[in-house]
Image (cartoon, rainbow, N blue to C red):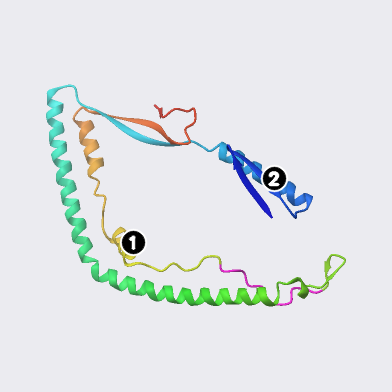
């Protein structure tokens, strides 16, 4: 049996009913896990800073960029909503199909679980593995069925619809990338910056290229 207690970030380990080899391996494993947790790799993300053009002509040009972006986004949203309506009949069809597959997977899971339970009841106890000076006198007395680790997850209509929308409907029409091109073409600047977003430590929050 293993008891873990955490006090001020220090993990105290109590090990009962284990041999010396098992204790050593467990302690080493815990030390390695603790060291890895303390040395997590920083995660970075690239963001962009926009600087306006310096002349009035460039500023006027940006107004046209903004208008084109708004039009692009509006048209993209309208097409996406129309696509959502078009796939409604397919959503119902795919949802019913997913339910049938779930029922089939659930039956297989129940069968595998039952086989595993029977195996534990009949074969696993050591009474069925006669020992002689530490060696097994007979081979495994029956077929081995591994435990079914993951039970099937029941599908939802919302999940099926989301998957179909991702497959059939275009959510990103490239409006922002077109706007960035227009912005730079008008004399503006789009400056990338790399910032730390997680496990930053002493690296700081912003690292410029």
Asked if the stretch drawn in magenta spans residue 140, the answer is: yes
Q: Tell me what residue is drawn at x 33 percent, y 71 percent.
A: 95
Find disc 1 in the rendering and name its residue.
163
- For the residue pair 13 and 179, the one nearer the viewer reads as 13
Is 184 included in the stretch rendered in magenta?
A: no
Q: Residues within 10 Å of mark 1 (few under 14, many from 20)?
A: few
Q: Which residue is mark 2?
A: 27
Residue found 33% across the figure and 74% down from its top: 96
17 and 160: which one is in front?
A: 17
Per the rendering, the mark at residue 3 is none
Task: Give me the residue at 13% from left, 34% from top.
Answer: 63
Q: CA distance from mark 2 to mark 1?
A: 45 Å
In the picture provided, is 76 more to the left or to the right than 138? left
Identify which residue, 86 or 141, lies in the foreground. Answer: 141
Q: Is residue 20 in view from this perspective?
A: yes
Quarter of the figure with the C terminus: top left
Nearest to the observer: residue 29 or residue 168: 29
Residue drawn at x 51%, y 76% as measured from the top left? 108
């Amino acid at each position: 049996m293993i008891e873990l207690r955490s006090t001020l970030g220090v993990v105290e380990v109590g090990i009962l009913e284990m041999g010396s080899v098992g204790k050593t391996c467990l302690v080493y494993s815990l030390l390695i896990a603790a060291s890895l947790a303390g040395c997590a790799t920083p995660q970075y993300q690239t963001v962009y800073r926009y600087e306006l053009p310096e002349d009035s002509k460039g500023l006027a040009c940006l107004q046209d960029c903004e208008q084109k972006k708004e039009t692009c986004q509006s048209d993209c949203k309208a097409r996406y909503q129309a696509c959502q309506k078009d796939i409604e009949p397919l959503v119902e069809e795919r949802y019913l199909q997913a339910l049938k597959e779930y029922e089939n997977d659930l039956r297989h899971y129940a069968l595998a679980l039952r086989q595993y339970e029977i195996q534990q009841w009949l074969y696993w106890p050591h009474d069925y593995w006669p020992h002689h000076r530490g060696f097994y006198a007979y081979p495994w007395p029956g077929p081995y069925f591994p435990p079914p680790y993951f039970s099937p997850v029941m599908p939802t209509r919302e999940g099926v619809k989301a998957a179909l929308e991702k497959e059939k409907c275009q959510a990103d029409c490239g409006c922002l990338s077109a706007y960035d091109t227009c912005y730079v073409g008008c004399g503006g600047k789009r400056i990338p910056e790399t910032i730390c977003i997680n496990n930053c430590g002493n690296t700081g929050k912003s690292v410029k290229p």
